Amino acid sequence: MSASGANGQEGAQQVSPEPMPPPNAATLPEVVVDTGAEQKQAPKKKKATQGTSGTQRGAAPATTQQTSESGAGETAYGPVDGYVAERTATGIKTDTPLKEVPQSVSVVGTEQMRDQGVQNLQEAVRYVPGVYADAFGYDSRGDYSWIRGTEAAYFVDGMRTNYGYYVNTSPIEPFSLERVEVLRGPASMLYGQVPTGGIINGISKLPLDVPHNEITFEYGSFDFKQVKFDSTGTLSEDGKWLYRVVGLARDADTQVDYVENDRLMLAPSLTYRPTTSTSITLLGNFRDDHSGSSQQFLPQIGTLTPNANGKTVARDTFVGEPSDYYDTESQSGSIFIDHKFNDWLKLRHVSRYTHTENTYESTYAAVLTPVRFAYLNSAFGNIFDGSNAPYLNSGQSEIARAVLKQFSETEVINSDTNLVAKFSTGALQHTVLGGFDYTRFQSDLLTSGTLLDNTLTSSALYPAAQPFVNLVFGGLQPGFDIYNPKYGQSTYLLSLAGVGVPPDAIPLTARPQEVQTQKGIYLQDQLKLGPWIAVLGLRQDWLNIEEVGAPDEHESATTGRAALMYEFDFGLTPYVSYSTSFLPLPGQPVGDEIYAAFTTWTPAKPIEGEQVEIGFKYQPDGAPFMINASIYELTNRNQIVQPDFLFAAVQGADVKVRGFEIEAIGNVTEELVVIGAYSFTDAEYEKYPEIYAFDSGISPYMEGKAVDGLPRHMASLWAIYTLHDGALSGLSFGAGVRYIGATDSYGLDVASVLTGTPQEIYVKTPSYTLFDAMIAYETPDWRWQLTAQNLEDEYYLTSCSAYRGDCGVGQGRTIITGFTYKF
């Protein structure tokens, strides 16, 4: 999902005439509700070149919320003109120039996503600084990026879509988005319950004034076949009614055998503008995904290092059963209401209802460390031989497997209503934002795992139930050879209840229904006094958690933001900011010590965080480029840690992250566009909780250690060159390079912990460098494109976990070609 901050930036260009405006377009200017400071002047026009959304590079794109406060140029809610976005709402909730937002924000438009062959949100943010896009390797189940050392929260149109567990949502389809915006650092003052590191927010494609129609046919690696279309324009001669229909159909395999990646998506929208002051838009999004789990949780011996026979597991190895599946159906409906009361007061309301059903059955590698073998033998009577851990044989080829079956149904209601007032008190200019948002999240889950019931105070089996739902049991299920897979040989599986059952008869247990209700009010003032800009904001949140059979939980928090900027005449705006975050963890139980037999389970407390950031933005008026840089220090408090899956998760860790980021994006010449980024991220445990009842010395041992699986250094460079004149006019070609530094992972040998002499487990995942490329040819009516990711087909690992014992395998070479017809 994404590249720098506003859901995608758009790429190829081709000479074409300026599109004609619809009838009466001049009498119905677009409505903009959220407004930031006045734009000083419209951007200078560049040579007109056709983009995928029907706009032209250098021309002001049109959409239902697409005219800036000054009446020219882009807005935060519509297409990005080329690669360089000028405005954002994600970073401040008003339509504001990027250079006036005192926090790090990156925007990726549809042109950039198209040029880079983006097919999911992780791919969209690979060239954004501070974002570890593929933190867990290639995973078909969802989007899993990290921002500034913490897991990212995902939003669409300013409202959250993910709630901690992958089966509660469906991955965001980037083709349905106009832009992807990455806000780095705390955003709780604007959005409530979000992590300290930041959010990724997609802006949906909504109706455009300028008619545009296109259909694309694509084919690529792993039998990838996809058709997508985008049609928009006016429905009435007076321009009061507009429409857009965006759709996609995909039939594809993946780099892992027996794992599909099929999708149907339809996103129709309709806009009604009864007056020049009011706009109402309805948006639907319907999804049907059929896939599996490409994440195989392969052991480190055979991936990070060769096995005893010098073998490495192939990237396409599937350790499950061909009948495994991961299917998701999702439907959502949104309404956008914008109303301008007068020249200084505006209203914006957005609300969405989402219903998601997910069915999941996955057989995967059970990475059994020696202590896990010992634990299972103590529970089931010495039926496992752990001498060759994590393998079952001396040749290091046979593994145990686990099975997980789940069915989840989730309903989410989001809404956000705010007023924006622009006025002055003497020489001081104000843009005041005040609003109320509401979320109701309801989840029902059936699972084959033994989930903790709040009525239980302790359980020796609970920690083992999550990772090893059903394990190989003596002669009932033979070991699985990952170098010579044989499927369909499992007759029985061991349930942790101690009963051998056929795979199709694994019992499902209902988890108590959970309902979360969140309410928040916020107030923000953007102040300007000459060249000085200040942003002050404050928010109050209330959260209520209801779970059947348990007392209600109540949480509340106050979060805020304060920032100061100075705007030089030549386009430089240095700034300093302070912001806080609040992230509840409803339904998450934690223990009071690591050894589960003695643990008392209690609900997890919210994670709280704060950040100080100093940086600058450089974007001269009308210049086709921008440079952003920042240094920061953030702290996450009350994080959960778990040295081994067989033992309890405990809370109380504090993580400190210090970092530096810089990005440059824009036109070096009229033909050449470049994106360059570098980030340094130093995340370590500042405090570690007491996790064992006895005096084992674990806490001081872990303090100062790096957080699991985060690269300190990341760098990327992408360039695209387009010919505008001559016989080859319309030809563009580009290339990119991505460097991801080595990652460290520290763990504890739990067997040594139990004897009071903790021993370190340390795993280092090597750095890797990947190359991407593209070539395209475009005319006013059609476009051909060829993209390649990981051009050299490098076998690489994104991270290997010391405490889990597995590795995430990265994406192999992926080549996709496509033809687009525009009419």
Image (cartoon, rainbow, N blue to C red):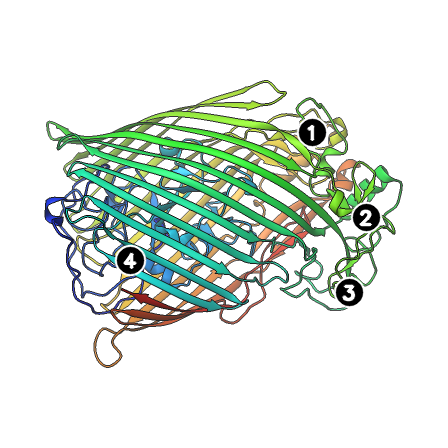
Quarter of the figure with residue 35: top left
Residue 332 in the image: state x and y as whole percent.
Answer: 42, 40
Q: Marks 2/1: CA distance?
A: 35 Å
Q: Marks 4/2: CA distance?
A: 54 Å
Q: Nearer the viewer, residue 493 or 625?
A: 493
Dot 1 or dot 4, earlier in sequence: 4
- Residue 2 visible within the image: no
Mark carried by residue 53: 4
Residue type highlighted by circle 3: Ala
Q: Residues within 10 Å of mark 4 (few under 14, many from 20)?
A: many
Residue furthest front in the image:
236
Dot 2 or dot 3, earlier in sequence: 3
Q: Secondary structure at mark 1?
A: loop
CB under 8 Å between discs 3 and 1: no
Q: Which residue is mark 1?
A: 593
Q: Nearer the viewer, residue 296 or 442?
A: 442
Q: Which residue is mark 3?
A: 308
782 w.r.t. 767: above or below: below
Q: Marks 1/4: CA distance?
A: 55 Å
Q: Is residue 336 left or right of residue 503?
A: left
Q: Secondary structure at mark 2?
A: loop
Q: Secondary structure at mark 3?
A: loop
CB under 8 Å between discs 2 and 1: no
Q: Marks 3/4: CA distance?
A: 54 Å
Q: Which residue is mark 2?
A: 492
Residue 672 in the image: state x and y as whole percent.
Answer: 28, 68
Dot 3 or dot 4, earlier in sequence: 4
